[in-house]
Amino acid sequence: MIKTMIITEDKLHIGAKALSDGKLVVFPTETVYGLGANALNPESVRQIFVAKGRPSDNPLIVHISDMDQLDRLVREVTDTTEKLMEAFWPGPLTMVMKKSSIIPEIITAGLDTVAIRMPSHRLARELIRLSGVPVAAPSANLSGSPSPTSERHVIDDLDGRVDIIIRGGDTQVGLESTVLDVTCNPPKILRPGQITYEDIEAVIGDVDYDQHLIDHKEVPRSPGMKYTHYSPKAQVIIISGIGMVGKIRQMKEEFELVGKTVGIMVSHEHIQQFEGIKCDLGQDNSIIANRLFACLRELDAYDVDIILTHSVKKEKLGVAIMNRLEKAAGHYIIDTGEESK
Ligand code: TXA
Ligand code: MG
């Protein structure tokens, strides 16, 4: 057990000093909380994997606060990459680029590329700037549980496993950053997020989804995509299509008959249609994105065996929501046919 210090923003300099001293510091970002360590110190980075219980073949994102940190970390910055940085940095877009030799192997899991992100959260950027080092940070959850979007989630998962936690309230986006591989042409979305296909297309004209996101078959280019991340303890089942409400009610009854506890997770417009343990995902996709992980954790806290939920349309932010939901469900989806809600 490590003695974890929980600090507020007026003590940010303590967090910054801890980072440069090789310690583990959890900090808020606009997407989810990050579990940070000095990216140029392999031993500190190794501690991230220990604290999370994360397999070390899953590479980490390196976070920077200022553009002048970038040149040392990557071998080249293409024109396309520059356009994207101008449009979306600071913000929830991570770009995979050719790595320079100063990036330790433990960050990239042996790949010759490195994922770089400049967060827009004021505290995150201030922390990185004060520490004077680039900061490697995965989401600050225990490996396998949903990414943390509140201080409570972080404390539940990592108290006693990290040196410092910086309080930052609830995160704003709620889903992890979009990961875009800019080493290929056209660039490929490896993980969908708040910055959508359409947003990227509007800036550079041509972009693809990684094949794995479409058919779940090809070996994923983003190694993290192969794990069932975001999984709560309960079995999540997604019900799509016109008969969603009736099907969820029927399944709830059937599960309860065989002694299972069921939690329901639906959007605000449907919440009144269900009784029992339930979580309101909110009215539109940006709220659903924001609450998704918190709802999964909330229902888990009731010790439910099964979580029944519905799909959203796979367009714009809906692509990222469905990506996380399908992973949480291990792709267990029941289609009741016709018009999907
Ligand atoms: O919003 C976020 O991105 C949060 C906050 C803390 O910044 N971080 C985050 O990190 O979600 P993590 O480690 O949970 O997810 C990093 C993703 C994984 O899917 C990983 O496989 C991918 O980025 N990734 C990292 N380096 C890569 C590389 N060189 N090539 C391909 N994918 C890479
Ligand atoms: Mg993660």
Image (cartoon, rainbow, N blue to C red):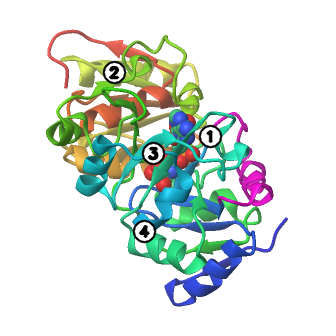
Q: Secondary structure at mark 4?
A: loop
Name which residue lies at 65% across and 43% down.
143
Q: Earlier in the sequence, mark 2 or mark 1?
A: 1
Does the closest atom of ligand 1 sit within 8 Å of the Cβ of label 1? yes
142 left or right, relative to 27 = right
The residue at which mark 1 appears reads as: 59
Sequence-earlier tag: 1 or 4? 1
Residue placed furthest toward the bottom = 10
Measure the C-alpha gap from mark 3 to mark 4.
Answer: 17 Å
Q: Is residue 149 above or below residue 111?
A: below
Q: Which quarter of the image is occupied by the C terminus?
A: top left
Tell me if residue 230 can be seen.
Answer: no
The three-letter amino acid code for the residue at tag 1 is Pro
**Residue type indicated by callout 3:** Glu
Mark 3 and mark 1 lie on one chain; the one further toward the N terminus is 1
* Residue 212 percent coordinates (x, y): 44, 18
The kind of residue on which mark 4 rests is: Asp
Write the start and end of the magenta stretch as one range: 39-58
**Residue 265, image quadrant:** top left
Disc 3 designates what residue?
A: 76
Crowd band around label 4 with a 10 angstrom C-alpha radius: few (<14), some (14–19), many (20+): some
Closer to the camera, 177 or 250?
A: 177
Q: Position of residue 6 (x, y in %)?
A: 64, 78
Query: Disc 1 versus disc 4: distance between alpha carbons?
Result: 22 Å
Residue corresponding to mark 4 = 66
Pick the front one: 130 or 1:
130
| Tag 1 near tag 4, CB within 8 Å | no
